[in-house]
Image (cartoon, helix red, strand yellow):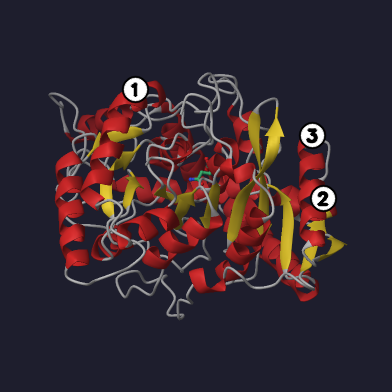
Amino acid sequence: MHQLTLAEIARGLADKKFSSEELTKVLLARIAQLDPQLNSFISLTEDLALQQAKAADARRANGESGALLGAPIAHKDLFCTQGIRTSCGSKMLDNFKAPYDATVVAKLAAAGAVTLGKTNMDEFAMGSANESSYYGPVKNPWNLEYVPGGSSGGSAAAVAARLLPAATGTDTGGSIRQPAALTNLTGLKPTYGRVSRWGMIAYASSLDQGGPLARTAEDCAILLQGMAGFDPQDSTSIDEPVPDYSAGLNGSLQGLRIGVPKEYFSAGLDPRIADLVMASVEELKKLGAVVKEISLPNMQHAIPAYYVIAPAEASSNLSRFDGVRFGYRCEDPKNLEDLYKRSRGEGFGPEVQRRIMVGAYALSAGYYDAYYLKAQKIRRLIKNDFMAAFDEVDIILGPTTPNPAWKLGAKNSDPVAAYLEDVYTITANLAGLPGLSMPAGFVDGLPVGVQLLAPYFQEGRLLNVAHQYQQNTDWHTRTPTGF
Ligand code: GLN
């Protein structure tokens, strides 16, 4: 039963082949058996899950239907869950039980989804390897000595290991797409404003966006349907109708114009990944797509701009964790200053402290114009590059990451080496565009992802292209040995 996708589960529940309660019990047992190897969960919510599963079964017995009614999922542990620990992967929030549900959590619960638990993540979503979590690193099910990517590494590892069919994640600079690529999943970062950020603990507010991680594009469509939509509680949420994503999966790709940016194929890209990217282009050509070389001339400035803007916003967002209102408080503070300093010094890990310092520096008087303002100007140039490209093509295709997964610890001594892994993903966040990563092959037994980018609010186009690709390839069906 653990091999079933969300779409198959929906059919099985509708046909009364099994109940949500039965399925939930099977998956909870599987998590108890296998997760000690992976460390993909921070908290399990067995009681809530069984209660939600029974309620979903009762709703179905009463004639209700719906693709998410009784479907087991998990939430990245930065979505607030009422009465349940919401740690953000940090000692700072180890004791924090959220007083309310995030909009995403509430919407999925209302649709009948069953929450199995909260997944491990890089501390405050800062990282690309899931090694900065206070709860320890997550292992990649494809090779337990390798990282699963980050920061939504727990959601990715759990879904890849068939502990559950799908999970939520968030993507500030690639944290849905990059772990999806490194664990052979399909992951979608929606347009900024498509999914509510209310109750999603902020890292960099102008870049953060929640989205689905699943094994197929079809399942991402189902989960996104439950997450997307206008939320008056989030001032950056956009009031734009949500299309029926599942209904749009079977559109023809005849005449689809794919742009492949020449800047993507630079020295930093593993040539074996470049070959797999071009093989995916050939596959899409067989389905009727036409391919064109394009240029994103400002791409080289994206990493420096992102690693000014994201820490700047983080330094501001994380100032609320002061040991006074909620979260970790140091023992026996001598005075108020000591309370602030030690609570933050002891509660935040090294990567978070590094980013707060970089961000506070970039925002400080005298440096603001040189760093923050400059980075914002670059951001606009990057957006302009995309707007020009989308005058000529319907989607942009390239690698999701320059390398496959790396060994645990391999980049720990050099934060910049890890930052460089984000080169293909962060531009979509800087521009606010939707992006999807889908499985496209293997290098040395490790999964490789191909990234698709589309104009604003064209999530449906990304899902359609990925679904058609998955109807004609079987990379996404490959299962890690032992799971
Ligand atoms: N790796 C990037 C960072 O560390 C992106 C993280 C994310 O998307 N949350 O900032």
Q: Quadrant of the N terminus?
A: top left
**First in sequence: mark 2 vs mark 1:** 1
Residue 380 in percent (x, y) is at: 66, 65
In front of the other: 342 or 328: 328
Residue 116 in percent (x, y) is at: 27, 43
Q: Residue at x 71, y 65 (%)?
A: 395
Name the secondary structure under disc 2: helix
Mark 2 CB lies closer than 8 A to ligand 1: no
> Label 2 belongs to which residue?
263
**First in sequence: mark 1 vs mark 3:** 1
Name the secondary structure under disc 1: helix
In front of the other: 277 or 261: 277
Q: Residue at x 22, y 65 (%)?
A: 60
Q: Amino acid at mark 1?
A: Pro
Q: Is residue 248 left or right of residue 288?
A: left
Tell me the mark number nearer the camera, choosing from 2 and 3: 3
Residue 198 in percent (x, y) is at: 32, 62
The picture quadrant where one finds residue 256 is bottom right
Name the secondary structure under disc 3: helix
**First in sequence: mark 2 vs mark 3:** 2
Q: Amino acid at mark 3?
A: Arg
> Label 1 belongs to which residue?
36
Tell me the mark number nearer the camera, choosing from 2 and 1: 1
Give the spatial CA distance, label 1 vs label 3.
33 Å
Label ID, residue 272: 3
Q: Amino acid at mark 2?
A: Glu
Count neighbours of disc 2 (C-alpha within 10 A) and say few if under 14, some if 14 to 19, many if 20 or more: some
